[in-house]
Amino acid sequence: MLQADQLKPLFDVFNLIQPLSFQVTEALKPLCQLRYFKKHEEIQAIGATCKTVYFVFSGAARIFYLKDGHEVTEYFAFENDLIIRAESLFTGNPSKKAIQALENSNVVAISSEALFRLFDQYPDLEKLFNKLVQRSYVETLKRLENLQFLTAEERYRKLLTDHPEIIQKIPLKYIASYLGITQVSLSRIRSSLR
Amino acid sequence: MLQADQLKPLFDVFNLIQPLSFQVTEALKPLCQLRYFKKHEEIQAIGATCKTVYFVFSGAARIFYLKDGHEVTEYFAFENDLIIRAESLFTGNPSKKAIQALENSNVVAISSEALFRLFDQYPDLEKLFNKLVQRSYVETLKRLENLQFLTAEERYRKLLTDHPEIIQKIPLKYIASYLGITQVSLSRIRSSLR
DNA sequence: CGAGGCCTTGACCGCGGTCAATGCCCGTGG
DNA sequence: CCACGGGCATTGACCGCGGTCAAGGCCTCG
């Protein structure tokens, strides 16, 4: 079970995005399940409909899907990052994507149904959720621009400056498909930069 | 000025996404400005901060930006489609993107500030807006997947089946950059399919 | 110490880019 | 009405980025 203030760091982040009253915070806490996953463990499987909103509490995770038999990584999440498979959560369709722990991780899991049920009572909670979604959307738009008109090398350099934590902590094979290239090409790009 | 029920078709679409009470509808109407743009006319210029939510009432429009001196099309909007430059509207930063009419078009323009001010009073209006944003987000995710791991030809074929209206109505030079390729390559792809 | 996963490197090739010439369509003015 | 000009699409020649296939080195872990 949750200890009294175990979730405080996460709630502090929420408050920076959308100030939450004491009441809202107390209503949200019981929905937060802290779950532990070992490195490489599956947090959600391909084919499940997304009915849970996750936050990385400690560790790291990724969203990936299968394309012609090999894995394509779509998103990396670190501490306090939101993880949703929007194309399933917002449509109700089963997701083709899986969520996997990349390190031993603690993850906060919130039932989306229970969360959404609180929205009428606590508009600020709805606002928080929507602001988080908006941030994800803006991030996705940036990635789209990069994929649309940068070379593989430019995309790698941009990742180096914008998200050095990814380069440091994540195996190259996952980074390659995230950048839209093969492991082999990424390896060549890296060696050409030295 | 707006005639009595001129906006009805658009509001009908809204109601399918999120049912709106008579009161909400009446509160929203005064915010809706119907504006006319000629083909090729600029609806919003590059550099402006996005403070307006647009809907295409009739006609067509696109969002584009400049990359190394030439235009990259990011989005096409047709009847009843939402147009926002999310990366500016949600961050408050000036947008590097422009909105342009592709045909003689009627566009519904809503001040985002005025709209957001109604949200506390009319939660259903906020829900409608957020559902529209969620749809845009899901669309963007799909485009990202396509760009990440389909060939140019596969992306073109997908556009043919998913959005034939784009192929029919939009000049190829705009479609090319939307697909992440050059006009020349698109031309070759098209000829190879016959 | 062996097995397997991850990264690197080499050889080769094809998709899509650039540059440039040509054709086509359409609006404008003589 | 035709002549001209400009924008859009097509086509050809050429090239380089990034893909595939395969071999080899290096860790980690059993």
Image (spheres, coloured by chain):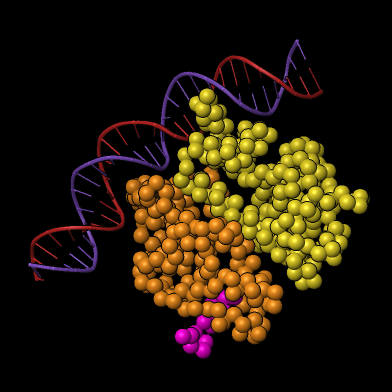
Chain colours: A yellow, B orange, C purple, D red
Give the x, y percent position of residue B185.
37, 46
Residue A147 position (above or below residue B132): above
Q: Is residue A117 visible?
A: no
Horizontally, residue A153 falls left or right of residue A102, namely left
The foreground one among B15 and B27 is B27
> Looking at the image, which residue is at 54% across and 40% down?
A158
| Residue that appears at 50% across and 26% down | A192
**On the picture, is A119 further left or further right than A168?**
right
| Above or below: residue D16 compared with residue B172 | above
- Compared to residue D14, the image places residue B24 above or below, namely below
Residue A120: x and y in percent read 77, 72
> Which is nearer the eye, B46 or A94?
B46
In x, y percent, where is residue B80? Answer: 51, 72
In the rendered structure, does residue B11 fall within the stretch colored magenta?
yes
Residue sitting at x 62%, y 32%: A172
Q: Where are the magenta residues, as a range?
A: B1-14
Residue D9 in the image: x percent, y percent?
31, 54
Residue closest to the far bottom: B4
Q: Which of the 4 image quarters holds residue B22?
A: bottom right
